[in-house]
Structure formats: C-alpha cells, structure tokens
Amino acid sequence: MRFIAVLLSVLLLTASLSQAVEPANVTSKQAQALLAKTPKMVLLDVRTPDEYRQAHLKGARLIPLGELNRRVQEVPRDRPVLVYCAVGARSSTAASYLASKGFRQIYNMTDGIVGWYNNGLPLQMAGR
C-alpha cells in the first residue's frame, strides 16, 4: 500500500512539472509579427537604464534583470509578455524566471534589440 502511495505521489509531481510553461523563443522578425497581431502584449526590456535611454522598442517597460525579482508584480499576469535585451541572454533568463513564477504566455526575443535593429525594424532612439 505504501508503494502505491509513493508511486501516486511521483506521478502527480511529474504531471504538475510537465504542465509548467516554457517560454517560447522568437526572433525579432517573429516578435514584430507577434506584436502586430497581439495588441495587449506587454513588451518588457530587461537591459540597464542607460541601454534603454539609448534605444528601445516603442511602448517597452523597463525592468532591469537585476530588479526583476523584486519588481515582478509590475508585470501583468493576464497578458502575454515579450521579453528582450541586447542579444537574448538576459531576456532568456528573465523569461525563464517569469515562467517559473507562473506566467503563462512568455516570449523571449532571442536576437534582442541588436537583431531588431539589424533587421531594420523601428526603434525609439535617444532624443526622439
């Protein structure tokens, strides 16, 4: 009987872990299309304030990666979230963190704002 209880516990744990949502990786071009068709998308920039001031995507919210843990409540849970940084490393960490906190629709822009710029997509630049 004890074996069955342990087995059932393991099966329940495995089932709950398998339902955890992994962030979806998208390129900057895919992100642009996603933003166009999802008007309620939250655009989250996890770079530094200096990087953000130089250039950012229009409408992006700045929460630097190092502050995300204490500011996670600022990210709406009821909307999809697209996370970006410079080249995709910090955003990958942030997207995984949000997924671990129960966010359901998380997208990581794998080529970051550098890829966005290299594809000729529009940016908000300093002084504009």
Image (tube, grey):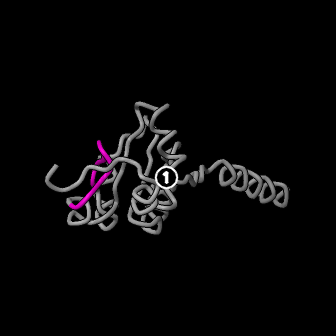
Residue at position x 81%, y 57% in the image: 7
Q: Position of residue 126 (x, y in %)?
A: 18, 56
Q: Identify the residue at horizontal 46%, vertical 54% (top origin).
A: 119
Q: Residue furthest left?
A: 127
State the residue in front, 6 or 116.
Answer: 116
Farthest residue, direction front: 120
Left or right: 125, with 104 as reference point: left
Task: Give the residue drawn at x 49%, y 31%.
Answer: 37
Q: Residue 108's x, y, as percent?
A: 50, 55
Number of numbered tags placed on the structure image: 1
Magenta-drawn segment: 54-62
Please determine whether, in this image, residue 112 is positioned above or below residue 120.
Answer: below
Mark 1 Cα-neighbour bin, 10 Å: few <14, some 14–19, many ≥20: many
**Which quadrant of the rendered structure holds the N terminus?**
bottom right
Q: Residue 52: percent from the left, percent from the top? A: 25, 59
**Viewer-proximal residue, 30 or 88?**
30
Q: Position of residue 61 (x, y in %)?
A: 28, 48
Report the side of 122 relative to 8 (left or right): left
Please check the rendered image and state whether residue 87 is part of the magenta-colored stretch, yes or no. Answer: no
Element type where label 1 sits in the image: helix
Quarter of the rendering containing residue 3 = bottom right
Identity of the amino acid at label 1? Ser
Residue located at (41% from left, 30% from top): 39
The residue tagged 1 is 28
Q: Is residue 59 left or right of residue 30?
A: left
- Is residue 61 located in the magenta-colored stretch of the structure? yes
Going by the image, does 87 lie left or right of 61?
A: right
Name the quadrant containing residue 114.
Answer: bottom left
Above or below 55: residue 78: above
